[in-house]
Amino acid sequence: MNTINAFTPFGWPIIIYLTLAGLACGASLCAVVFLRTEKTAREGQSYVIARTALYVALGSIVLGALLLLYDLQSPGNFYRNFSEFNPSSAIAWGTRIIAVFIMLCIYSLFLLHSMNSQEKTSPIGPLLTGLLIFFALAVGIYPALVLGQASIARPLWEPLLLAPLFLLLGLDSGFALVQLLTFKKWQEDTLEKIRKLDLAVIIGQIILFALLLSISTFSEAGMNRLLFGEFSLWFWIGVVLIGWLLPFFFSFSHSPKKNTIILTQLSLLLGAFALRAVIVFSGQGPQAFIGS
Amino acid sequence: MSDLPPIPWESPINKSRSLKMKRAGMVIDLRRCIGCHACSVACKTENEVPLGHFRNRVRYLEQPDVETLSFLPLLCMHCQDAPCLKACPTQAPTRLSDGRVVINQDKCCGMKACISACPYGAIYIDDTSGRADKCDLCTHRTSLDLKPACVASCPTQTLRYGDLGDPEDPVAKYAKEHNAKPFKEDADTHPSILYIQQEKWMEKAAATGVQLSSEDNEIIYEQNGRSS
């Protein structure tokens, strides 16, 4: 699966990167939520969660960028990504979006660390919040546009559907990881809200993925490979069972216990990774090519 | 370089025409192709294409329910609306003034966006340099008024190189007379390589394009097994 050829140019490093970019998007939006809407009353707990979320976002995107660098076949020319600019290339925009996003995360973390513990207002003002939201969304969406630029050759990668799907995957995995890391600091009512959101996100994923398979001109051979062939285990176990059914089942549990919540969040994380792997791998390959 | 004499066994292309060329392209007459692979071999030799990759390749296609083989030479289509040009962040794929698309190796960082975007599977990564590469219609030869290596080596004149933008060019006239059409027209990339008598079923049979897949290896092996 990792052979570089005309059919599968994107392998595991790209899939892991896509997952990390999604995590960065979701975690930074989680930080914004805790900084702007849950502030003051929680005796500083919100700031701890927001700080952790920003560290997750920063760590994920930096690790992802390093993976992209590793995946380059001619890394010595990496600087060309900055010295040359092709406005029609989603990657060209993405490179710059990542750079600004990293700087925003670092600056926000600096402000959070240097704030006075007695302060009641968020040290991150509306402008910085707006920028964080904008660039977090851009980090979450642009990978879908990168794949979408190949949609002439690889019909499964329909950008109009991939963009919201990747955003949903990023949101649920980002919130899930932050929740796993700061579980004890979350309030009961917030957990309840997140549980309902998880449910909505899973339903959204299912609808978007079903639309992707039905609307795009994805070949019958590619569909068979996805549902019954090479990627069927990834799809049925990784996506359907772990990513959709388990969290869906847990979200109906009336008294959220620690173990249930941890299992739900882990399922969401694994499911998001599996769905990206399925989309990237089954979108490639000879069977997925136009004309097949 | 420009003082080098043409290779004696080739007829040079009219110099004045080649310099004015606006849309360098090719017409491939499938009625003439005998599947000899001379074009692939000439291309590999001329351009030192690494093992396992092709810039030009003849696909053997079996039409469903018909007991004959068809031959389909494939190469970079030098699309006028090329997806590789749009996808590359460093502008490594470049369009020359005569319309052909070439890869500027100095700018390539091996991100593979162009490979992913190409609907014809025409681009590969050169394992030694780590950079993308593909057919450039033998720019080094055509700048010396020689035909591309594949065209020069074709024993049946299946491949014809010329200016498709000039209605007076014999190759453009030939394309018009014989209703030449692009391969995978649905991709809507406006290729500069046109085919005479290509049929829709060929698109499915040769979906993978120029490069080699393990499944193609199996098909070739089976064909060799049958014929021996």
Image: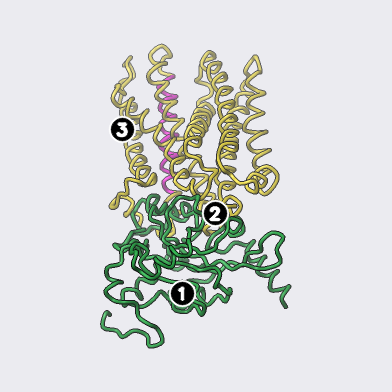
Q: Chain of mark 2?
A: A
Label 1 amino acid? Answer: Cys
Distance from disc 2 to disc 1, alpha carbons, whole Å, reads 27 Å
- Residue in the picture at 40% in, 69% down: B171
Q: Are marks 3 and 1 on the same chain?
A: no
Label 3 amino acid? Answer: Tyr
Residue B150: mark in rendering = 1
Which of pointers 3 and 2 lies earlier in the amino acid sequence? 2
Give the position of the N terminus of chain A as an image quadrant: bottom right
Location of residue A139 in the rendering, given as x and y in whole percent from the top left corner = 41, 37
**Visible residue check, residue B124:** no
From this viewpoint, which residue is outermost toward the bottom?
A: B8
Q: Nearer the viewer, residue B113 or B64?
A: B64
- Residue in the picture at 28% in, 52% down: A83
Q: Mark 3 or mark 2: which is in front?
A: 2
Residue A52, magenta (yes or no): yes
Magenta stretch in the rendered image: A46-66
Residue B11, magenta (yes or no): no
Q: Nearer the viewer, residue A266 or B118?
A: B118
- Residue in the picture at 31% in, 85% down: B5
**Visible residue check, residue A34:** yes
Distance from disc 3 to disc 2, alpha carbons, whole Å, reads 38 Å
The colour one sees for chain A in the rendered image is yellow
The chain coloured green in the image: B
Residue A107: mark in rendering = 3
- Colour scheme of the picture: by chain
Q: Chain of mark 1?
A: B
